[in-house]
Each structure stands twice: as C-alpha cells, then as structure tokens.
Image (tube, coloured by chain):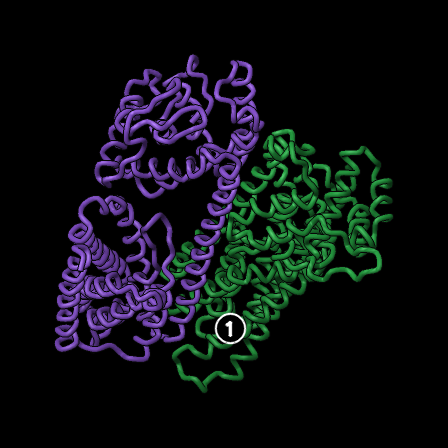
Amino acid sequence: MPKRIVWRILVAAVVVASTVASALVVSDSDVPLTRAVIAALAAGAASFVAPAVSSRNRLTLAISVGAALPFVLVDGRFEAAGTMAVFFLGGTLLALTEYIRRGSVRRSLLYAGRLFVGYCGFVFAFGAMRNLVGGSLGSSGWDALIAFFVGGVIWIGIDLALWSGTASNDARVSPRFVALSGLKDLNVFITLIATGGLFGMMYGAIGWWALPVALLPYSFAHGAFRRFQETKSTYRQTIRALAQIPEVAGLNLSGHSDRTAALAVAMAQDMGLSPEEVEDVEFAALMHDIGHITLNDPTVAEHGWTREDLARWGAEIIAGAPSLDRVASHVRRQYEPYRNPGEESDPSVSKVSRIIKTASAYDAHRMGEGLSQLEALERLHQGAAYEYDPEVVASLRRVLESGVSVNA
Amino acid sequence: MSTVRRRQLRIAALYLVLGLSALAAVLVFADPPGWTLWFVFAVAFAALEWNAVEVNDRLFQSSGSMVAITAGTVFALSSDSSAVYAMALMAVLGPLVPADIKHRRWFQPVANLGQLILAAVAAGLVLDSTLGDITRIDSSVLLRVAMAGAAASVVHSVINFALVSVAVRSVYGNRNLLPWSGIHMLVSSQVVMGVVGGLLGAAFRVVDKTAVIVLILVVYLVAHLSLASYSQLREAHQAALRGFVKALEARDLYTRGHTERVAYFAQLIGEELRFTGTQLERLRWACLIHDLGKLAIPGELLSKPQLTPEEFEEMRQAAGKVQSILAEVDFLRPMVSISGVHYIDLDRFDPSNWSLEASIVATADAFDALTSTRRYRMAMSQQEAFEELRSDTSGRFYPDVVDALERALERTGEVYGATSSTRTTDTREGARLA
C-alpha cells in the first residue's frame, strides 16, 4: 500500500522536524535539557490517563503536565518560549501515541494541534498576568495563582471553541450542541489544570514529593468522575432494556424503540438542541411506546384504546420515576398533531415531542409498512405543517441524507 | 413524653455536656490558630460536611474529615498554634446542617455536636502530640506527617462510631444497630483520607504559600461535587426502576406492593445475616427486578388459577425474554441471576447453581406470596408460611435464611399473613406463582 507508506513517511518527517525545531528553541533557552526531555516524555505518557467525561472531547493528564511546566522548567523563573517548546515536543509525542492507538493521522494531528494552540494561549496569558500583578502581592504565591487562573480560563475557552468547530464537522451535529456538551466537562478540565498547578507550585519546595501530594487528590476526583459516567451509562442501558419489554412481549414492532431513539437523537443534535434536551429526546424516544405494555391487559383489549390513551398510559408509567418527569410529559403529548387546520400550532407541545412523533412515524413507515426511505420521507412531507412539524421533517431529511446509520 | 424521646434527651444532653466541656477546656488551654487561614479551612469544611454524599445505604461519606485533618496538620506544624483548637472549633460547624435546622430535627444535630467535638479533640491531640516537636519543616518530615494524619483520622472515626453506636443502642435498642455493622469497611478509606490530609497539610507548610490552599480545595470541591452528582444519578436510576415496578403492579390488584414487601423482607434477612451495604444494595436491586418478567406475560395467563404445562411453559418463556434483555445491562446481570427465582422448573432444579442471595430473594418472594391473598387462594398465617417454607424439599429456601427471616420479624415485632388458618388451594402452586 504505497499511500500508507507515504503517510508514514510524512508523519515521521513531521515528528523529526518538530523535534529538531523544539530542541533548537530549548537549547537556546535556560531550560536544562534533561528536565525538558523528562517533561516532554511525561506529557506523552500522561496522555494515556484520561478521566471519564460526558462529551467526546479528549481530556487527559497531559493537560496537568502542561499546567505544571511554567513553574518547574527553570528554577524560580518562568520562560515562555522554552515552556512552549517543551510542550510542543510533548504534543508531538502525544500525537504519535494517538496515531499508533487510533491510526488516524488527521485526528491525532487535530487533537495535538488543538491542545498546543490552547496551551499557547495559556502561556501567553500566564506570562502577561504575572508581569501585571507580579511584585504587588508579595511572596505568598497569589500573583502566580491569579496568573494561573487567568491562563487556565483562556486555555479552556480556546479548547472549547476549537473543539466545537472541528467535532461538529466530524459528526454532523450543530456546533452549539458540541460546545454545550463540552461545557459539561468543565469540572474535569478545571481539576486537570488545578492538579498541574498544585504540582508546579510545590515542586520548587519539596521536589518529587509534590507528585503524590498532587496526584492523591486527583485520584479521588478521577474515581468520582468514573463512577458518575458509569452510572450514567448504566442508567441509559436500564432504560433501554425496560423500553424493549413491550417488544419482547410481542406488543410492538421489534427494535422500534432503539431505532426511533437513534434517529431522534441524530435529529435533535442536528437541530442544535442542548445536551439536556438531547438526553430527554433519547429517553423519551426509547420509552415513547412503553404504554403498549398495557395492551397485555384483557380489559384494555375489550374496551379499545386510542393513540392518546397509549401516550397517556406510557406517561403514567414513566411518571412513576420522579427524575423522569420531563420525559413523561414529552411522551404524553407525542400523539398531538403539529396543528389542526385553521389553527396555529400549540406552542406548549415541546420540540422533543415533535421529534419523537416524526422519528417514530418514519420508523413505522419503513419497518412496519416496508416502505423505502424515499417513500417514507415522502409520506412525512405530505403530513408536514399539519401532522408533523416542518422544521423537524427538514431535519430528518438532512439526517437521512448525511447517511447516519439508524437501522442498527 | 415517650420512652424514646426521654432517652434521646438524655443521650443528647450527655454528649452535649461532654462535648462542650471538652471544647471549653481546649479553648482555654490550647493555642489558637491564625484566623484567616482557619476561616478558609472552615468554609471548605462546612461546605463539604453539609453536602455529605450517600455512598451506601445510611452511611455517609464526607470529604470534610480530610479537610479537618489537613487543617489540623497545618496548625500542629506551626509553633504558635495547635491542631486541637482549630479542629474542635471546626467540628462545631459540622452538625449545623441547614437542612436539619429547616426541618427542626434536633436530636441528631445536638448529639452529633457533642460527639464530633469529642472526636475532633482526640484527633487534634494525636496530631499535636506527634507533630508538635517538629521545628524545621522540610520534605524529610512528610512521611511522618502522613502517618500522623492516618492515625488521627482513624482515632477520629473510631471515637465517632463508638459514640454513635452507644447512642443508637441506648435510644432505639439493639435492632437498629444492624446497618452500622459494616463500619469496619470504612476504616481503610479513613486511613487513606488521613494520609492525604496530613500530606497536603505538611506540603502546604513546606511551600509556605497561602495561595496553594486554593488549588488543593478546588480539586477537592470538584471531586466532592462529582461524587454528589453520582449519588443523585444513582437515586434517579433506582427511582426509574421503581416507577416501572409500580406500573407492573397497577395491572394486578393482588400483587400490589408485592415487590416493595419482597425487597423489605430481603433486607431484613440480609441485615440479620450481617450483609454489608453493597451486598444489601445488590439484594434490593435483585428484588426490584425479580417480577419484571411478568410484564411480558399475556394478561389472561396471569389471571388463570390453574395452568396447563404448556401454558406454564409459555409463561416461563415470556418472562425469560425479559430476563435476558435485563441481563444485557452489565450492571444488572448479576442481579438477574440472583433474582432468577421465577418459573423455575422444580423437577430440574439444581441446588448447586443456587446462591445465598438467590435463596434470600426466593424466600422473601415465597413468604410474601404465602402470607397474602391471591386470586386463587387466601393468605396463610405467618406460622403456617414458615412451616410451609421449611417443609419445601427443593432446596430453594436455605434453612439459615428462613431462620433469619423469622428472627428478624420477631425483632421488629411485625406479623404478616392471615390471623386464622384459611387455606384453600394447593400451596405448592402458590409458592411457585409468587
């Protein structure tokens, strides 16, 4: 495969070039060479430790190493150029390990590049603030802390901006959604930066003892993040399993809730809903037909039912869980048409309800009636502006055209 | 005034007097800390204490004790202040939980106040006596400080738990002490907290930069908040499952409340057998899902008093499908196997695949079925139900487990089932269809 070889040569060339460039800058600065090498290696190695996060943003302990560098590279002094060069070298190593692990040149370069650009912002802001407040605050360390804080804010801002720009392009979701979901990981980002700062500010006084001192609190936080994300995924899995009960009981189309949820989430992300709303969409779509369980009851079969009844029964089941109140109300109103002829559409029906209604109808046309993608979409278009929300149908078309796999 | 209330008053008064006199002695004889620094620590301590996180059942984990140890270390290492003063004063803040004050709960906060002051004084004395002689602070003392921190933390928790168990025992009697039996599990985490707390305090003194404390506290606060949201999410998860259980029970008047009662009986048995908090929690989840298979069973089968073997097989398969989708959830998989008590084929039952936990769920389930009235039979008396469980030869109900349930019900004084014997149909079928 010649193409692959070309890529590998290219990567090797980039690695060599960046190593030489940063080595030149480091040798020109006051940073001791051994210390620079250790720091760069540490940044590369620390990228393997990644706390659990909500979004797909990749945050690793390499951020902590970067945050510690301004304090530790030169004794008692801060040197901007040398610091950035060392982190650049670390970033190169990190891109290399990412490439080896994931195999995508583009992704690893994007990731390392984003990290480095954010870091440059951090170093500049740190240096500028230090000059500004330095000396006026005495030796209690407050000047360094304030500079560090401002630098950290700048770093997080740059990272979020760059990440929402690139990631939304990759996954075809709105940048607003990516940025908001990135914000949910703010606590992790802050912890990583603060851990680095803790190590950095202590290293001068107690040497390598600073490592356990900084890492012990971090590991506490690391465990808390992991537990949170694990519970979150378990919660989702449980809801998914429960939502399948009507299907295994033969009361609903098999796989309907899963497919509806996948489609509805893609639509919600496309429409730029917030991460909370997208989560509501996912849960509500998974459980939108949970009311079908009731069809098992002989008395219900006897007396008949309407779509409204099914939606209401489903909502009643979901409302048993206080934490799912919002989801229950979305499910309750999913049967309502977008608007009745001659009336305005009812603003109290949520976007979430409308998305589920459309996604569910599409799946029913496709898998229930066996229509083709085009035919099913055409049906929804015919009902747009009366039965279905036209905005939602337009989003469905975009999602289907982008080829998101929803028949999993 | 009821007996419990009188006892509460006595214990609260005793602890309060002991605590306050210890506090007074410390305030008179010990050296006060630097107030700015103390205030920073105190704010962090109160923030963590007031938002304690429920980790397992009724045991709360709070990072507050770690901050207290850090503060104590910092002040013990300085020549003109003492750990005992700073920690005793900080302990006063702990029980002033805003939620308690809002709900006008008084016994726990007042008893806690005395008890926490006593524990803090003891921990502070440990720190002062082990670290007070250090004059030159550099990295050579770090290891010693870490060990002192661990010792102080263990002393703190041991005294704390001892005082709590004395209070619970003398107010409510022995039976309410059981959830506290797993306390030894917490000691290891207390050691870690103490080491970390001591190390951070010493490092702070060595570096001698006040600003560092902000970074330390930031990491702790974030970690604590994440732990708190984890705990909330866990509750939500369980609440969602409970909601579905209610939905199930809404379909059948006769089994209303069944799942909750099974969970309660299982908990009683588990406590009697000295299960830890984690084990009890597994048991609770298993009970919550044990009946979900019923949701997939056609309504007409459920209401039939007598089933043909084919119908029974159909029922088994429908329930099995639900079990298998629940088993796809990693977290629930072990619970599904524990709760697999339903519709087992008694002729092919293999006791070697049976576990203690499975036996507990099966026993709790059968006990509730036997002591409540169903479509096809009236409830038995509690005595008859126990006889029935003991006479079962399948091996599903371990004798230890049945005994534990009987003891637990004696302890709580509750009686289930019919008061007189009114048996109508085949009881074996009853236990099977629980």
Outermost residue to the bottom: A136
Measured as percent of width and height from the top left, residue B349 is found at 41, 16
Horizontal arrangement in the rendering, residue A153 relative to residue B393 (left or right): right
Disc 1: which residue: A149
Which residue is painted at 21% across and 39% down in the image?
B411
**Which image quarter: residue B131?**
bottom left
Nearer-the-camera pick, B64 or A264:
A264
User: Looking at the image, how many numbered discs can be counted on the residues?
Assistant: 1
Subunit of mark 1? A
Residue B25 vs B406, above or below: the answer is: below
Horizontal arrangement in the rendering, residue B141 relative to residue A42 (left or right): left
- The chain in purple: B
> Can residue B25 be seen at all in this image of the molecule?
yes
From the image, state the color of chain A: green
Which residue is painted at 47% across and 76% down in the image?
A144
Measured as percent of width and height from the top left, residue B371 is found at 34, 30
Nearer-the-camera pick, A342 or A142:
A342
